[in-house]
Image (cartoon, rainbow, N blue to C red):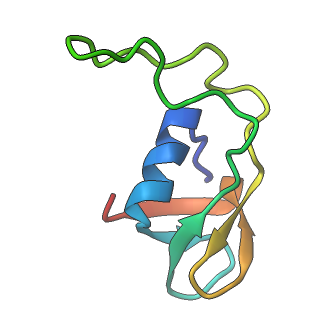
Amino acid sequence: MSINLPLDTLYQLNRGKPFVEVEGIDGDIQWDECDLSGLPPERIGVSYTSQGKPPKGQWDNLPKTFKAMNGGEYFIDHIITIRGT
């Protein structure tokens, strides 16, 4: 079983750096970052009175991998669970 993550969740994971369980890896690893350059911002239309909304294309052209604090690179679709976001 794998997790499909939309763009706004990837932004949250980059900020929170949670522990994740990855298929085929013993124990949890800590998320460090995934490269979101070239993708839309997390929210559009943000103002003093509005929290904005997610941009269109939350599922388009998303990165396939993320880097962990241990220096390894792992496939996002191999994540089984996310802890501590």
Residue at screen point 67% across, 45% down? 36
12 over 41 or under it: above or below: below
79 left or right of 64? left
7 over 34 or under it: above or below: above
42 over 2 or under it: above or below: above
38 left or right of 25? right
Front-most of 80 and 41? 41
Residue at screen point 54% across, 46% down? 10
Q: Where is residue 2 in the image (x, y as percent from the top left)?
A: 62, 52
Quadrant of the frame with the C terminus: bottom left
Residue at screen point 50% across, 35% down? 8
Q: Is residue 6 visible?
A: no
Outermost residue, left direction?
Answer: 49
Q: Where is residue 51 in the image (x, y as percent from the top left)?
A: 29, 19
Residue at screen point 50% across, 31% down? 42
Outermost residue, front direction?
Answer: 48
Front-most of 76 and 34? 34
16 left or right of 43? left
Q: Position of residue 18 (x, y in %)?
A: 41, 67
Where on the picture, by quarter, is residue 34? Answer: bottom right
Front-most of 72 and 46? 46
Where on the picture, by quarter, is residue 76? Answer: bottom right
Q: Where is residue 72 in the image (x, y as percent from the top left)?
A: 72, 81
